[in-house]
Image (cartoon, rainbow, N blue to C red):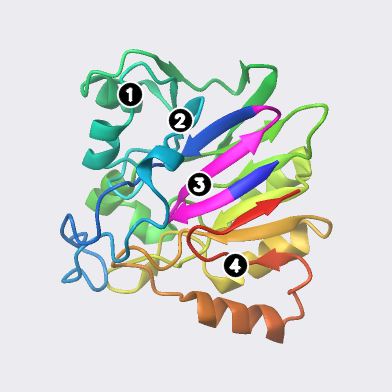
Amino acid sequence: MKLTQIRNATLKVEYAGKKFLIDPMLSKKGAFPGFPGTINSHIANPTVDLPLPLSEILDVDAVIVTHTHQDHWDDAAKEAIPKDMPIFTQNARDQWDIQMSWFRNTWVLEERNDFGGITLNKTPGQHGRGVILEGLMGDILGDVCGIVFTHPREKTLYIAGDTVWYHGVEQNLKHYKPDVMVLNSGDAKVLPNESIIMGKEDVYEAYKAAPLAIIIASHMGAVNHASLSREDLRAFIVDHRMNSRVLVPEDGESYSF
């Protein structure tokens, strides 16, 4: 497999002869406002440019949208992606949302799915903790999912999606035993100071729970509410002697396994 960190949670995955684009946020730098109710909402998104040409990013066989928040599925993606591209969504609500932009080859992920001999397993996630999931903010954060890729000729890949560390992720690790996992690790926060994706302590929990897996830290440094920098996460990784198994890519960087 080959994984390329594009920007934010946007990844390009080459796996068992197929290419997948995950959670495409393709807007130019500063194209839309910061997210209301989050830290640093005065900063426009995305906060950095794309590192690769669109033609290279869009050279894929399918798109997977783990949820339709604007930093995972934006207007630029709706305009740039061909309308007949296979697009996998977490549920019928997200499928309908994407179909409203005239995409005609959409598929709702079941627990287990086949695409060109590759098995795509939908996994649960939790977009925040405790009180933050109650009331209006919980409705805004909504449902999320992750994906596990398996194939007889490939290592098992787990893309956790927008989730914090909780028992569901722990169960995913126990069940699938991934060789490689991608964790959204920028510690995005809503007001007053609540994490809605993983931060450094969450990454540490995943590191301990999967002692043989390589971890790739994604969803960093590209949106207004990211509170954990790559530099700070790398320092934490060194301090906790995790650097043999935890990678923090720059945008545009690739790894092969």
Q: Nearer the viewer, residue 16 or 104?
A: 16
**Residue pictured at 78% horizontal, 47% vertical:** 179
On the image, the x and y values in percent for residue 65 come to 42, 35
Residues tagged 3 and 2 counted as in contact (Cβ below 8 A): no
Which residue is the site of mark 1? 82
Measured along the vertical axis of the image, is residue 115 above or below residue 215?
Answer: above
Q: Nearer the viewer, mark 2 or mark 1?
A: 1
Which residue is the site of mark 3? 11
Instruction: Report how far apart the C-alphas of labels 1 and 3 lie in the structure.
Output: 18 Å
Residues tagged 1 and 4 counted as in contact (Cβ below 8 A): no
The earlier-in-sequence mark between 1 and 3 is 3
Which residue is the site of mark 2? 63
What's the magenta region?
4-17
Provide the secondary structure element on which disc 4 rests: loop
Which residue is the site of mark 4? 248
Q: Nearer the viewer, residue 6 or 210?
A: 6
Q: Nearer the viewer, residue 9 or 50?
A: 50
**For residue 214, what is the image quadrant?**
bottom right
Name the dominant secondary structure of the magenta segment: strand
Provide the secondary structure element on which disc 3 rests: strand
Measured along the vertical axis of the image, is residue 17 above or below residue 157?
Answer: above
Instruction: Report how far apart the C-alphas of labels 3 and 2 lie in the structure.
Output: 10 Å
The three-letter code of the residue at mark 4 reads Val
**For residue 18, what is the image quadrant?**
top right
The earlier-in-sequence mark between 3 and 2 is 3
The earlier-in-sequence mark between 2 and 4 is 2
In this picture, residue 135 sits left or right of residue 242: left
